[in-house]
Image (cartoon, rainbow, N blue to C red):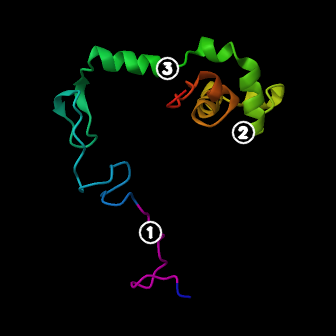
Amino acid sequence: MDHRGRGGGAAVLDVRWPPGSTGPGEPSGAPGQWPEDPYGRGRRDAASGLYEWYDYPEEVRQEQDADRVSWADILSRWALVEADLHDVYGVDVEDRALLRTRSWRWLDVRISGLLAADTRLHRAFAPVPETPGQ
């Protein structure tokens, strides 16, 4: 199989982006178009799609605050964190040599991942879904 391009040089792997986008990080949809943000105010930056500032209604802010889990809440359930870190990532929190070589960001990313996956920690904070008729 010939892996060289038409010019005779080595071929470069083709990088794929989301369908309809024109580059990495751009949402899919119409090329070059960013979705409208109902809370964006001021001028929108053409490169990033971000507005100068955002004005969220109080009910949206309260909804976002209700979805947040504080570090105090997480640390109060440390046994769940410890068990999930071991099950999901194979991390033994008693391995001091490992933890000394890792950054706070490294641990933060993994604990955030536990909140986003079906784990003991996630279930401790996830609201119980309401079942119609019960």
Q: What element carries label 3?
A: loop
The three-letter amino acid code for the residue at tag 2 is Val
Neighbours of disc 3 within 10 Å: few (<14), some (14-19), many (20+) = few
**Magenta stretch, main secondary structure class:** loop
Q: Residue at x 39, y 85 (%)?
A: 6
Contact, CB < 8 Å: mark 2 with mark 1? no
Q: Could you say which disc has been placed on residue 14 in the image?
A: 1
**Above or below — where is 59 with respect to 50?**
above
The boundaries of the magenta stretch are 3-16
Q: Is mark 1 on a helix, strand or loop?
A: loop
Residue at the far bottom: name it.
1
Q: Residue at x 26, y 18 (%)?
A: 57
Contact, CB < 8 Å: mark 1 with mark 3? no
Neighbours of disc 1 within 10 Å: few (<14), some (14-19), many (20+) = few
In percent of width and height, residue 4 lies at 48, 83
Q: How far apart are marks 3 and 2 (CA)?
A: 22 Å
Nearer-N-terminus badge (1/3)? 1
The three-letter amino acid code for the residue at tag 3 is Arg
In percent of width and height, residue 130 lies at 52, 28
Quarter of the rendering containing residue 95: top right
Residue at the far front: name it.
133
Q: Name the residue under label 2.
A: 88
Quarter of the rendering containing residue 39: top left
In percent of width and height, residue 131 lies at 53, 31
Magenta stretch holds residue 62: no
Magenta stretch holds residue 11: yes
Q: Which residue is drawn at 24% across and 56% down?
A: 31
**Above or below — where is 46 with respect to 94?**
below
Q: Distance between the residues labelled 2 and 1?
A: 32 Å
Quarter of the rendering containing residue 105: top right
Q: Name the residue under label 3.
A: 68
